[in-house]
Image: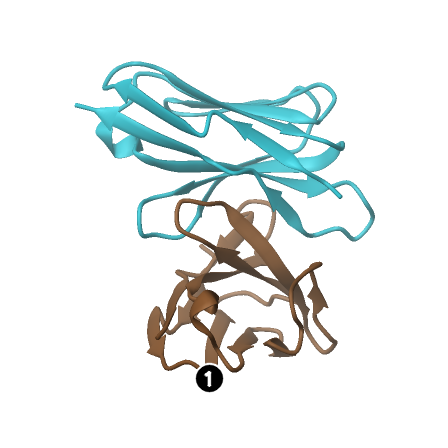
Chain colours: A cyan, B brown
Amino acid sequence: GQQVMQIPQYQHVQEGEDFTTYCNSSTTLSNIQWYKQRPGGHPVFLIQLVKSGEVKKQKRLTFQFGEAKKNSSLHITATQTTDVGTYFCAGRGSGAGSYQLTFGKGTKLSVIP
Amino acid sequence: GAVVSQHPSRVICKSGTSVKIECRSLDFQATTMFWYRQFPKQSLMLMATSNEGSKATYEQGVEKDKFLINHASLTLSTLTVTSAHPEDSSFYICSAYSGTANGYTFGSGTRLTVV
């Protein structure tokens, strides 16, 4: 079945440093989504990428979708303490009628003030 | 924006009892909802796909007789953990697809503790 690998598992950064998390799918995806989960909370949708090579920005966050639609990355510029949490990528398969998401294991970001 | 309400948020039950968790889409209709389980510091594992008006589709390794799913309307899906045991203690989260702009909206989760 579809697998989504996400690295690194943990990342500790000094406030102001940049942060990147990467996802790789074993199969071609129809789209990839990114979620943020704060400690004790539930995943919150950040963005969805659909097109091959797509790049989207949300303030200090930059999301990329690979040309082959099998990998993706999330980059945060100049991290802040409010960025703390676990970032998950989730891939949606390309099969007809496929609505299921396969989640990566997440990258837990800690920001040292 | 799209909202999914999940209740209860926390529940403690005795071993052998059953617990029902509700998941409601408040401002949109969800023909399909998903139930996940998340162990501490781990990712979300899909348990089953809940389809309105039909049987749920369970992932491999998930006991359908233990985790009963009912999706009786376009806005409500329930997960019942039957004859709960301590190893069933976990964080259970539901989600529903709420459209391209909102992706999948998650409920706030239910932390189940079986004692």
Viewer-proximal residue among B4 and B101: B4
From the viewer's side, name the closer residue of A108 and A80.
Answer: A108
Question: Which residue is found at the position 42% from the left and 80% from the top?
Answer: B15
Residue beneath the point at 49% across and 66% down: B27
- The answer to which quarter of the image holds residue B3 is bottom left
Whole-percent x, y for residue B2 in the image: 48, 57
For the N terminus of chain A, the quadrant is top right
Locate residue A49 relative to residue A38 in the image: left or right: right
Q: Is residue A103 above or below residue B29?
A: above
Examine the rendered structure and indicate whether residue B13 appears above or below residue A62: below
B13 w.r.t. A47: above or below = below
In this view of the protein, can residue B26 be seen by the observer? no
Name the residue beneath numbered marker 1: B16
Asked if residue B35 shows in the view, the reply is yes
Query: What is the secondary structure assignment of the residue under circle 1?
Result: loop
Tell me residue B25's x, y (percent). 51, 68
Q: Give the residue type at disc 1.
A: Gly
